[in-house]
Amino acid sequence: MSDSDRELVVPEGGFWPAPEIPQPNIYPMEWHVDTPRLAEIYEKSKRAVWNPADLPWDGLDPEEFTDEQRLGIMYWFSVLANFDSSGPAVFARATIHAFEKHEEDPVRKCFFSITRDEMNHEECCQRTIGRLWPGGPLDWKPTTDLEKAAHNNIGWLYHNGGRYWSGYNTSVGRHSLAVLFTSFMMGEVAASTLFRMMASGTTHPVFQDMFQRIGRDESRHLQICMTILENEWPGLNEVDKKQITKQLRAGFVFLSMILWEPPSQFWDLPPYFLANHRVLVEYAREGGLGVLSYEEQAENWRVAMAKVRAIVGRWGIEFPAIPELDIDGVEVSGDIAAEDIIPVF
Ligand SMILES: [Fe+2]
Ligand SMILES: [Fe+2]
């Protein structure tokens, strides 16, 4: 650099102020920290990263299952993917939302870490299906009645997943962080419950390893949600609280598909769906995947709901009635629309 390049220009009358950036916008850049605890969790999450490619996949041999069991396990992972494979995109969008709203730096980073983890969870669905049923979930030609039933059910399932995604897309920007995160919290309670159930039920070492790792991630996600909510809940107004009650009911309706069985609300399914779903899940169970019985699932789901109820009750949020599990509470009026459903895994 020559001396002449170094000549600083100081305008007469002072520097011109840069134009104000219209918000919401990800600029200007800044890294403010209000909650050091969240920054700590983010540091922990970086150290806890694992690689799904390193699971002992050679130990998952398609030959050790009957065709029906392989199909059943592929089917169950396709159902799981309805939730876990939406995780990366749902949280990526929430991450962008947090940047645009200039949420504190650790909130943005924690959202990113959840996005990262969810990518691993979806990779587990992808790899398991790829090994046991090449072309799955949908890119294969069914021949037997059982195969046709599985293929058709998965198609209907993703039709509903698509409705959820469209609803989430239109509603995510409208919600306060507290509303958004109460729903996320419910999703994480459900997810950690599910993977604990599966890890305890499976007889297969690859699935055991997988479910334990995913379960650990989900517990961390729950920790993140709770830490954010401790900050956000005190500022909740009555309108938000009512909306949260409705969304908790919506969360139950949506998540029951993977934790238990789908209630008749929201889900747009053909009349034979549930019967065939039961047959397919029974084959997965028989194959040692670790799907608990209908009653055991109901009991675990009930305990998880009681946990969510206790958490939100501390902040004066009423819990919705869940007659399906004999949980009483506030009657949520009106239909559950796709925009009401926020939870991810
Ligand atoms: Fe999660
Ligand atoms: Fe997940």
Image (cartoon, rainbow, N blue to C red):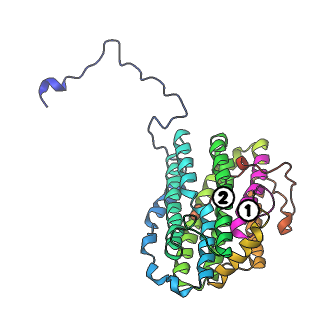
Where are the magenta residues, as a range? 242-267
Q: Position of residue 27 (x, y in %)?
A: 46, 35
Dividing the picture into quarters, in which one does residue 216 lie? bottom right
The answer to which of 262 and 102 lies nearer the viewer is 262
Is any atom of residue 230 visible in this view?
no
Q: Main secondary structure of the magenta part?
A: helix
Number of residues whose C-alpha sits closer than 10 Å to that of mark 1, classed few (under 14), some (14–19) or many (20 or more): some
Q: Is residue 313 left or right of residue 125?
A: right
Query: For the residue marked with disc 2, what is the amino acid?
Result: Met
Q: Position of residue 310 (x, y in %)?
A: 76, 62
The residue at 59%/62% (across/down) is 84
Above or below — where is 224 with respect to 13?
below
Q: Give residue 97's mark.
A: none
Q: CA distance from mark 2 to mark 1?
A: 8 Å
Residue 127 spot, x, y in % from top left = 49, 70
Magenta stretch holds residue 264: yes
Asked whether the beta carbons under mark 2 and mark 1 sit within 8 Å of each other, the answer is yes
Q: Is residue 68 magenta?
A: no
* Location of residue 29 by image quarter: top left
Q: Residue at x 75, y 56 (%)?
A: 268
Question: Which residue, given by chain and number where applicable, does mark 1 sit on?
Answer: 308
In the image as oriented, which residue stretches furthest toward the front?
Answer: 143
Q: Quadrant location of the C terminus?
A: bottom right
Q: Residues within 10 Å of mark 2 (few under 14, many from 20)?
A: many
Can you identify the residue that label 2 sits on? 185
